[in-house]
Structures are given as structure tokens and as C-alpha cells.
Image (cartoon, rainbow, N blue to C red):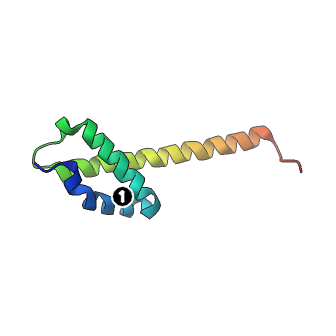
């Protein structure tokens, strides 16, 4: 069974298609870390679909994090009130 590195190209293409070029490297990097930690769970003969599922979950997590940051920024702006110059 090929390791997760064999699927880096397709994984990168998937990440670019889902979140754009700027975040793709972060998605691929995080996916590689998850794959390394969970390498015993990677099914034989289905490595690419498994890795794309991991990449999908990583992408979802990044979007959730961004939504939380945006909500926190807005809450802090409301809490702080208008900026005085």
C-alpha cells in the first residue's frame, strides 16, 4: 500500500478546488499530520479516498475556525463600542 505521500498531488488538487490556493498548503499539511498519526487506520487499497475524506474534514475545520474568529471579532467590536479618535 502506498503511503500518504504518494497521494500528495491529488490531495493538493482537492484542497485547491475546495478552499483555494492560499489555504491548500495548510490543508495538505494538516492532512499529512493526521494521516501520519492515524496511518494504521488507512484502509488497504483505499488510501486516496480515505485521505480525501481527511482533507474534507480538515477543510471543514478551517472554515469553522474562521467563522468562530469572525464571530469573536464582531462580538469584541460590539463590546468595545465605537472607536474614538
Q: Outermost residue toward the right? A: 85
Q: How many marks overall? A: 1
Please provide percent x and percent y for residue 10: 26, 61
Q: Quadrant of residue 42?
A: top left
Instruction: Judge from the rendering whether residue 13 lies leftward or rightward of residue 65; answer left or right.
Output: left
Observer-nearest of 27 and 49 = 27
Q: Regarding mark 1 in the picture, which secondary structure is present there?
A: helix
Q: Is residue 41 above or below residue 84?
A: above
Q: Is residue 19 above or below residue 38?
A: below
Q: Residue at x 45, y 47 (%)?
A: 62
Q: Residue at x 27, y 36 (%)?
A: 37
Q: Residue at x 74, y 44 (%)?
A: 77
Give the residue at mark 1: 15
Please provide percent x and percent y for residue 14: 32, 60
Please provide percent x and percent y for residue 29: 36, 49
Instruction: Judge from the rendering whether residue 14 lies leftward or rightward of residue 68; answer left or right.
Output: left
Q: Residue at x 14, y 49 (%)?
A: 46
Please provide percent x and percent y for residue 57: 35, 45
Observer-nearest of 6 and 72 = 6
Instruction: Judge from the rendering whether residue 69 lies leftward or rightward of residue 85; answer left or right.
Output: left
Q: Residues within 10 Å of mark 1 (few under 14, many from 20)?
A: many
Q: Is residue 11 above or below residue 75?
A: below
Amino acid at each position: 500500500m502506498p503511503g500518504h505521500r504518494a497521494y500528495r498531488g491529488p490531495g493538493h488538487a482537492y484542497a485547491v478546488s475546495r478552499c483555494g490556493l492560499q489555504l491548500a498548503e495548510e490543508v495538505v499539511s494538516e492532512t499529512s499530520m493526521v494521516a501520519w498519526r492515524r496511518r494504521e487506520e488507512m484502509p488497504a487499497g483505499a488510501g486516496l479516498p480515505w485521505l480525501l475524506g481527511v482533507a474534507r474534514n480538515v477543510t471543514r475545520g478551517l472554515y469553522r475556525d474562521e467563522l468562530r474568529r469572525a464571530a469573536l471579532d464582531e462580538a469584541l467590536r460590539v463590546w468595545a463600542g465605537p472607536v474614538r479618535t
